[in-house]
Image (tube, grey):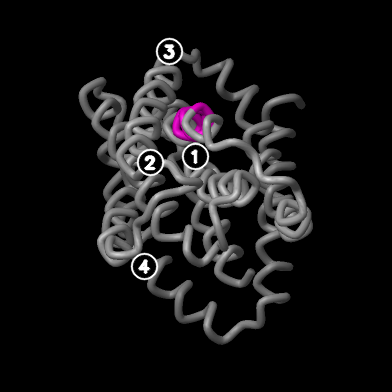
Amino acid sequence: MFDLLLLFVAGFLAGSMNALAGGVPSVIANATSTFALFPGGVASSWVYRDGVRDVCGVGVKPIAIATVTGGVTGSVLLLLTPTTTFDVMLPWLLLIATSMLILGPKLGIRLQRVKRSQTAVVLPVQLLLGTYGGYFGGAVGLMMLAAWSLLGGGDIKSLNPTRMVMVTAANAVAVIVFVLAGAIAWQQCLPMIAGALAGGWSGAHLGRRLSAPTVRAITVLVAVLTTVIFFARAYL
C-alpha cells in the first residue's frame, strides 16, 4: 500500500501541475505538464520492462493498442475542449483523483472479494482508462490497478510493471499529439521538467524516511486542499 501511495502522489501531481504554469491557459498547461513528466515515466518504464505481462488473460499487445488508442482520443478531446469548459471540469477531475486516494485502500480490499469478471471487458475498460490518461491523467495508474484487480488480473505487485508501461504509452501518444498541435508552453515546460526530476529524486529519499501513515496523511491533505482551491477558482 505504501507503493500505491507513492504512485498516487506521482499521478496526482501529474494532473495538478498545471497550476504551476502561471499565465498559461489551463488546457495548454495540462498538455505542458504531461510533457514535463513524460521523461520520468519513460525511465520508470525502462526499469520495469522485464516485468510486463498479460493482464486478465489478455495479451500485452491488445492492451497496449487499446491504451494508445485511448491516449490519442483523450489528447485530441483535450485540445478540442474550450479552456472555460476545462476550467469547470478540472475540479471534478481532481475530485475523482482525490477520491481514489481516500477510498483506494478499502476499495482494493473489497475488489479482492468480488467475483472475477470476464476478460472480454478488459479492452473496453482499458480504452476508457487510456482516454482518461490522455485527457487528464490524474491517478490513472491507480485506476488501472484497481480495474485490473477487479477483473482478476492478479496481485498489485505483479501488475505494477504493466501499469507503468501502459500509463507511459498513453502519455507518449498524448505528448506527440500535443507537440504536433503546438500545445506545449516551452518556456514553462523546461522549469517543470527540472522540478519534476528534482522532486522525484528528493521525494524518493524523503519517502524512505517517513512512515506510510505520514505519507498518506500529507498526500490526502495536499490533494484535498488542491481540489478545494480549484473548486473555489472555478465556481466562486
At a point 27% along the width and 49% down the height, the residue shown is 190
Extent of the magenta region:
124-132
Which secondary structure, mark 2?
helix
Residue extending furthest toward the bottom: 209
Mark 4, Cα crowd under 10 Å, few <14 / some 14-19 / many 20+, is: few
Q: Quadrant of residue 60?
A: top left
Q: Earlier in the sequence, mark 3 or mark 1?
A: 3
- In three-dimensional space, the C-alpha distance between marks 3 and 1, rounded to whole angstroms, equals 17 Å
Which secondary structure, mark 4?
helix
Q: What is the three-letter code of the residue carrying label 3?
A: Leu
Where does label 2 land, which residue? 34
- In three-dimensional space, the C-alpha distance between marks 2 and 1, rounded to whole angstroms, equals 8 Å
- In three-dimensional space, the C-alpha distance between marks 3 and 4, rounded to whole angstroms, equals 32 Å
| 88 relative position to 165: left or right | right
Q: Are marks 2 and 3 in contact (CB under 8 Å)?
A: no
Q: Is residue 212 above or below residue 128?
A: below
Viewer-side label of 2, 1? 1
Where does label 4 land, which residue? 198
Q: For residue 137, which numbered disc appears in the image?
A: 1
Q: Earlier in the sequence, mark 1 or mark 4?
A: 1
Q: State which quarter of the image contains the C terminus.
A: top right
Which secondary structure, mark 3?
helix
Q: For residue 80, which numbered disc appears in the image?
A: 3
- In three-dimensional space, the C-alpha distance between marks 1 and 4, rounded to whole angstroms, equals 21 Å
- In three-dimensional space, the C-alpha distance between marks 2 and 3, rounded to whole angstroms, equals 17 Å
